[in-house]
Image: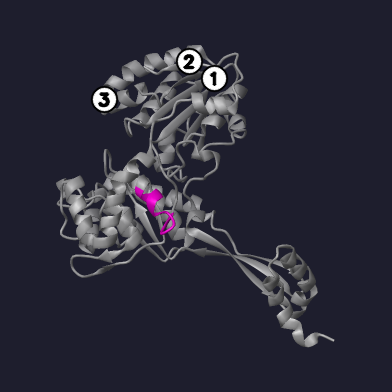
């Protein structure tokens, strides 16, 4: 089922690996021309345009954008108790992990009378997106809301697509998760029109003001991602999320049942989802293929899983050694990377590029999706080479506060003037010397 690439006995360069390894085709630029008219219409006509596009894309037209508070309380009251307990535990663990991420202000005494303080200031208003396409993602509500709350964000607005099956409201499990987390501003809007409304704001059908936000976070389809790209600068964004990915680095000690089940679990998300096994063991590769053939047909979303696993974005990479495998997974920079090798903890410590690393046989990606305490909003498409997943820091701005006394400025004035003149910016220097003109002999 999985295509194979045999790199044993080879030492390809990083550039060769990046061009060789499986990757989904995901052309955000190509989606921009579809998205631009939507964004411009929302900018110019506000909620009326939002509702028109919602009716066109989601096949339902809500009476307005903002969801009534009574709908949130009702959704939580009617939530399956087992799901509520699971969400509560997920929230508890996420708060425990993210609570340790909050940075402290630091003041540096540069000289006597001269300090620089780095203050961490939370963003004032944030838009959080929970997808509603092939699946419902209350877990994504948790992963977006918890770090924003711990960062101290002033106000949060949660967007999720309206569902025809639920009378034009977002999925009730999304609403219940919002209520559990204390998020009282929820908008029934999805896709590119959601990002545009978050960026520009508007007036709801009842005359209420929908204030714009400063940052938009959360994953979505290619059109939502294109809208993020188009509006970046008007709003901040967390990342341009592409199709989800799992890479598994495994040797002959790995259990093929575990490996196969984990590859399937990621393929379940989307036909473009990537499932990649990097292994030193051809025997394991054969066993995983055999295990997949039986498990795929038995899984609920077999058609979707089959399409993902047989696509060009998925495959098995054979390598000679674990060291070679580490070079491959670092070049791939997976959203999720599992290490299923002997001494997995030591191997994991050598990884440089991954959105999140899952160590050993009993830390599957599914654990991180829900209840590990880690965040599952992670960089895709190789972005883990330079970017991090969502965290408390995503919602904080580092601001330097410069506080110098007269004596401290006088002491450094000559060097500031010298540098200003070296850059042919004499007025910069004059802004210093003007403060001491009365001292000239």
Residue 121: x and y, percent? 52, 65
Q: Residues within 10 Å of mark 1 (few under 14, many from 20)?
A: many
**Residue 54 placement, left or right of 253:** left
Q: Which residue is mark 3?
A: 303
Residue for point 38% across, 17% down: 291
Q: Residue under circle 1?
A: 251
C-alpha gap between disc 2 and disc 3: 25 Å
Q: CA distance from mark 1 to mark 2?
A: 7 Å
Q: Could you say where residue 189 lies in the image, as x and y percent from the top left?
A: 25, 53
- Residue 284: give its label: 2
Quadrant position of the N terminus in the picture: top left
Q: How is the image coloured?
A: one colour
**Mark 2 residue element:** helix
In the rendered image, is residue 297 in sight?
yes
Please indicate, yes or no, whether residue 157 appears anywhere in the rendered image.
Answer: no
- Relative height, residue 296 to residue 57 (above, below): above
Task: Specify few, some or many for label 3: CA neighbours under 10 Å numbering under 14, 14-19, or 20 or more.
Answer: few
> Is residue 339 a member of the stretch shown in magenta?
no
Residue range (magenta): 227-236
Is 384 located above or below residue 408 in the figure? above
Secondary structure, mark 3, is: helix
Task: Name the outermost residue toward the right.
Answer: 441
Q: Could you tell which of marks 1 and 2 lies nearer the N-terminus?
A: 1
Q: Is residue 417 above or below residue 364?
A: below
Who is closer to the viewer here, 277 or 177?
A: 277
At horizontal 27% and vertical 51% (from top left) the residue drawn is: 37
* Residue 235 lies within the magenta run: yes
Q: Please determine whether, in this image, residue 286 is positioned above or below residue 378.
A: above
Farthest residue toward the front?
424
Q: Nearer the viewer, residue 52 or 244?
A: 52
């Amino acid at each position: 089922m999985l295509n194979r690439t045999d790199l044993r006995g080879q030492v390809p360069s990083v550039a060769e690996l990046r061009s060789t390894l499986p990757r989904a085709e995901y052309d955000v630029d190509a989606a921009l021309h579809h998205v631009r008219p939507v964004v411009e219409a929302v900018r110019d006509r506000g909620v009326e345009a939002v509702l028109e596009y919602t009716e066109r894309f989601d096949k339902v037209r809500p009476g307005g954008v903002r969801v009534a508070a009574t709908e949130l309380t009702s959704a939580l009251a009617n939530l399956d108790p087992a799901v509520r307990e699971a969400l509560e535990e997920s929230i508890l663990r996420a708060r425990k992990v993210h609570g340790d991420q909050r940075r402290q202000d630091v003041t540096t005494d540069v000289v006597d009378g001269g300090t620089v303080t780095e203050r961490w200031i939370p963003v004032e208003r944030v838009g959080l997106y929970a997808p509603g396409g092939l699946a419902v993602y209350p877990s994504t509500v948790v992963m977006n809301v918890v770090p924003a709350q711990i960062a101290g964000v002033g106000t949060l607005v949660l967007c999720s697509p309206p569902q025809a099956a639920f009378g034009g409201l977002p999925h009730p499990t999304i609403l219940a998760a919002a209520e559990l987390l204390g998020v009282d501003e929820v908008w029934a809007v999805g896709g590119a029109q959601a990002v545009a409304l978050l960026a520009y704001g508007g007036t709801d059908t009842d005359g209420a003001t929908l204030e714009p936000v400063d940052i938009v976070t959360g994953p979505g389809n290619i059109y939502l991602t294109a809208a993020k790209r188009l509006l970046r600068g008007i709003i901040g964004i967390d990342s341009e999320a592409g199709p989800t990915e799992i890479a598994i680095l495994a040797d002959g000690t790995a259990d093929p049942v575990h490996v196969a089940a984990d590859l399937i679990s990621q393929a379940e998300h989307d036909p473009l989802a990537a499932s990649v096994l990097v292994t030193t063991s051809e025997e394991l590769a054969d066993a995983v293929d055999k295990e997949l053939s039986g498990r795929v047909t038995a899984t609920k979303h077999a058609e979707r899983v089959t399409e993902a696993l047989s696509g060009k974005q998925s495959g098995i990479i054979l390598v000679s050694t674990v060291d070679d495998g580490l070079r491959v997974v670092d070049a791939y920079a997976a959203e999720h990377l599992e290490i299923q090798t002997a001494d997995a903890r030591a191997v994991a410590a050598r990884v440089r590029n991954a959105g999140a690393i899952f160590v050993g046989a009993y830390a599957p990606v599914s654990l991180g999706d829900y209840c590990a305490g880690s965040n599952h909003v992670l960089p895709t498409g190789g972005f883990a080479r330079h970017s991090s997943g969502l965290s408390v820091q995503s919602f904080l701005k580092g601001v330097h506060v410069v506080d110098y006394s007269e004596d401290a400025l006088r002491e450094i004035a000559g060097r500031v003037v010298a540098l200003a003149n070296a850059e042919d910016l004499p007025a910069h220097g004059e802004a210093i010397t003007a403060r001491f003109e009365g001292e000239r002999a």
